[in-house]
Amino acid sequence: MKFYILGSGSGGNCTIFEDDGVLLLIDMGLSFKRLKEGLKLINKNVIDLDCVLLTHEHSDHTLGLKYVYPLPIYCTKGTYDNDSVENIVPYQEFKIKDLRVIPVSTSHDVIDPVGFVLINKKNEKLVYLTDSGYIPDETIPYLIGADYYIFESNHDIEMELNAKRSMRTKKRIMSDFGHLSNEDSANYLADLIRENTKEIVLAHISREANTHELALETHLNIYKERNIDISNIKIHCADQFEIVSGGK
């Protein structure tokens, strides 16, 4: 189970997931050039992809879908529409070859957003969850005890309040339909991780209201305060422009 985050943030999102004959994208909000560069790293091409899992309709997650048509696109009804779309329903599991895929509800200012839980034949589990103001109670049980987390840690609250943005934008980002703060992200993960957890990648980090260093510091401090042992967990940050890989 391996993943390659080609870009994560408001400038565009796309992650390649690879496992035992399955090769898919989670979101496609980047250029065709960026996608080809990522696939080249693993000696693959666009024709090797099985499908795209789409979290929601915002352009930073969908802008590049035209470059991968007619790949099957799995998304909730109303998120995206063309003749290659397969509609999915939160909490209703489906399969891509031998990979189990469970879409889970998130909370964002769009029609029906989801994150994804991916489980392979070895019962390894990856959680992909970004663009959510909070995590619905129904979703929490599906996220517990993953081996890998790609998990939103969007903003530092103080930096967000002082950012050069409109108050309307600040309220949206910090609302229940916006994005997780560093503190909320860390507290959620402190509840979710277990002894089998190997890796956490902090994702969708704001360039205006956060830094990689601050996100990591906040997480580490909260885990320490809550007596969560993370000595065997790799924690690092996704990037908007650099490819970040993980899994094994």
Image (cartoon, rainbow, N blue to C red):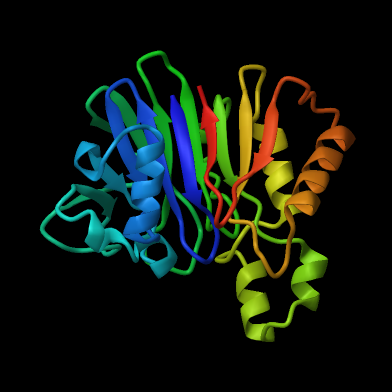
Q: In this image, 195 relative to 58: left or right?
A: right
Q: Is residue 212 above or below residue 223?
A: below
State whether residue 103 appears in this view.
no
Q: Is residue 33 above or below residue 245?
A: below
Question: Toward the viewer: 242 or 64?
Answer: 242
Q: Relative to 171, is 136 on the left or the right?
A: left
Residue placed at 32% from the left, 62% from the top? 64
Residue furthest left in the image: 83
Outermost top residue? 122
The image quadrant of residue 61 is bottom left
Percent position (x, y) of residue 2?
45, 28
| Closer to us: 45 or 178 | 45
| Horizontal side of residue 111 vs 213, given as left or right | left
Is residue 71 at least partly visible in the picture? yes
Q: Where residue 247 sits: x, y (%)?
A: 52, 27
Q: Residue at coordinates 68% horizontally, 82% vertically from top-left?
A: 165
Relative to residue 161, is residue 62 depicted above or below?
above
Q: How many marks?
A: 0
If the image is split into quadrants, where does the N terminus sit?
top left
> Which residue does the image show at 26% across and 22% down from the upper left?
98
Instruction: State the image coordinates of residue 23 (x, y, percent, origin top left).
Output: 30, 34
- Taking the image as shown, residue 116 lies to the left or right of residue 188, namely left
Please tell me whether residue 219 is drawn above or below residue 172 in the rendered image.
Answer: above
Whole-percent x and y of residue 54? 34, 52
